[in-house]
Image (cartoon, rainbow, N blue to C red):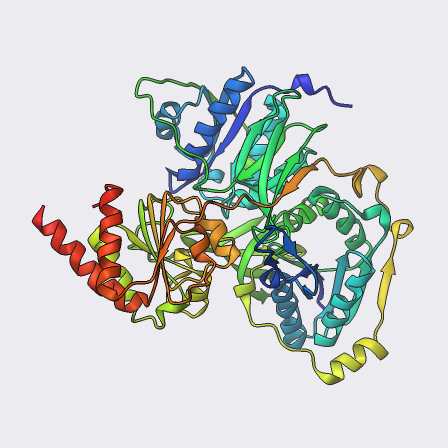
Amino acid sequence: MLNLNDYKGVFVFVQQVDNKVTSVSYELVSKGKELAKELETSVTAILLGHKVDALCTNLAKYGADRIVVVDDPALETYMTEPYVYAMSEVVKAYNPEIVLVGATAIGRDLAPRVAARVLTGLTADCTKLEIDPETKNLMMTRPAFGGNIMATILCPNHRPQMATVRPGVMQRSEINEDAKAEIVHYKLDDIAAHINVEIKEIIKKTAGKMDIQDAKILISGGRGMGSPENFKLLDNLAEALGGTIASSRAAVDSGWVEKDRQVGQTGKTVRPNLYIACGISGAIQHLAGMEESEIIIAINKDPGAPIFEVADYGIVGDATKILPVFTEQIKKLIEQK
Amino acid sequence: MRVLKVVVCIKQVPDTNEVKLDPVTGTLIRDGVPSIINPDDKAGLEAALRMKDEYGARVTVISMGPQQADLALREALAMGADEAILVTDRAFGGADTWATSSTLASAIKKLEFDLIITGRQAIDGDTAQVGPQIAEHLGLANISYAEDIKLEGDSVVVRRQYEDRYHVIKAKMPCLITALSELNKPRYMTPGGIFDAYREKTVTIWTRPDLDVSDSNIGLKGSPTRVHKSFTKAVKGKGTVVALDIQESADFLIEKLKEKFIL
């Protein structure tokens, strides 16, 4: 039986791609800090990569008390096994009580293998993390069944308690410009020996558009927009309001927009200040990805559409007719200012 | 020539797209919801069947689940799989991803294989953990989120999806790949295939005694995680819904955006 008291501290895996920290990592350092306070312990960021020391400054500003850096040429680009090895070694050396990882395409590949290797449980895609006031266990809440059910999961007898966390769900804290973190360079000599695949090519998707998880205003379209051409109406409104476009799964499946625009259970979770859903009926899977938005406006022809259940303001009508008038009026208002 | 052996892990899941919420109680209506082969797994199966078409690969499907999962395995056989194994026992019940993957890994160990394909994630659990964890228990390389799979000699070349890019990754077999439903469009069962699935082919049943795995690594007992509670989400208070003409609609929205200081 393992002695749970031997495991201390909240650890956060910091994801970096091309030596840029992925947004969710700051969200998790912020959340980790909160949890650490409740547990009267500290938050440690684990940073894997090559020549990544410069990334430490910002991690400290978001609240990391300590940063464990594993710097190795073999960690420059994400590959499963070298990362799993390095991460597992750090976890085994420090015995944290909690390990948080972003539920990204990297985190959801890395975390399961690390959990299996260090013999502990892992809860996927959490949307809420709390400390049980009595047992001090981590209560990990996640959607299941396509977002129909929420389940709170515990990992009572194994350590660390590991969770992947959906990007965009936890709030970043205010940054503290003066904060400093202790930086530890953790040495592992044989990381390159763990490379067991070969990356033949890296193909970047042409983005050009703002990431929907970073946007404060999202104009989102679904099947009810009728055609890919009508998505131009969404673009126009997004431009007028300084936002970007998003979509439902139906519009992605129809090939009207790129997959990176998709909001929902199999797409991204977003939490903008304003979400305007146009011609989106509001399948549960879609609602799961956007219902935490500050203000939700829905325009849909069908008065029975479930999207109206979560909308702050709903218009029963044809978005393709209303949007041009609405956009023109906004443009005029902005010009007058 | 040596026959390429591919093992595909499939899960029978309720079709969550068909699940509706009771508008009054907010609970799930599960009655009459059909069971299907999990979509990512079905794409993995199709990828394996294409290797059979092209290279004469032998395709074995394996599923852990209750007796009813026989139906999913028969469908896989009817699509063209050669062999099907159902891993079923009450002792395996209540398993989290750790125990599920260790059970499946111990079953796969009994088989000869060059390549294991699983779906990325199941639509009922959405964890994406079982595939990579099977690879971990078997000590194999894994490539997750496959959008394209090609064979090249004794290796696979996979286009692996990330949020903003792809990696084209080459790995020597044996290894494990997790498939995305975008990978392909799975074929339908054929009438001849259905006939064979029920008359010519069998679903092999493996129970607890058939597997060489410790009790501490299976079922509820072998699961580090516990479901503490589950609940349906609280429904947010309904907002204002209006039906107006086009101009009035635009005016209404402008008014609201001004109230909220967005304009």
| Residue B208, percent from left and from top | 88, 49
Which residue is at a point 80% across and 43% down the rendered structure image?
B218
Which residue is at a point 56% across and 33% down the rendered structure image?
A87
Which residue is at a point 37% across and 49% down the rendered structure image?
A312
**Residue that protrudes farthest toward the top in the picture:** A40
Q: Quadrant of residue A49?
A: top left
Quarter holding the N terminus of chain B is bottom right
Of residues B249 and A286, the one drawn nearer to the viewer in this rendering: B249
| Residue A55, percent from left and from top | 37, 30
Q: Is residue A59 left or right of residue B177?
A: left
Of residues A331 and A303, the one drawn nearer to the viewer in this rendering: A303
* Vertical relation: B117 (above or below) A176: below
Which residue is at a point 13% across and 50% down the rendered structure image?
A334
Of residues A36 and B84, the one drawn nearer to the viewer in this rendering: A36
Is residue B200 something that shows in the picture? no
| Residue B256, percent from left and from top | 26, 48
Of residues B23 and B181, the one drawn nearer to the viewer in this rendering: B23
* Vertical relation: B114 (above or below) A138: below
**Residue that protrudes farthest toward the bottom in the picture:** B192
* Vertical relation: B196 (above or below) B121: below
**Residue that protrudes farthest toward the left in the picture:** A336
Is residue B112 something that shows in the picture? yes
* Vertical relation: A293 (above or below) A177: below
Q: Is residue A224 left or right of residue A165?
A: left
Counting the numbered discs, the total is: 0
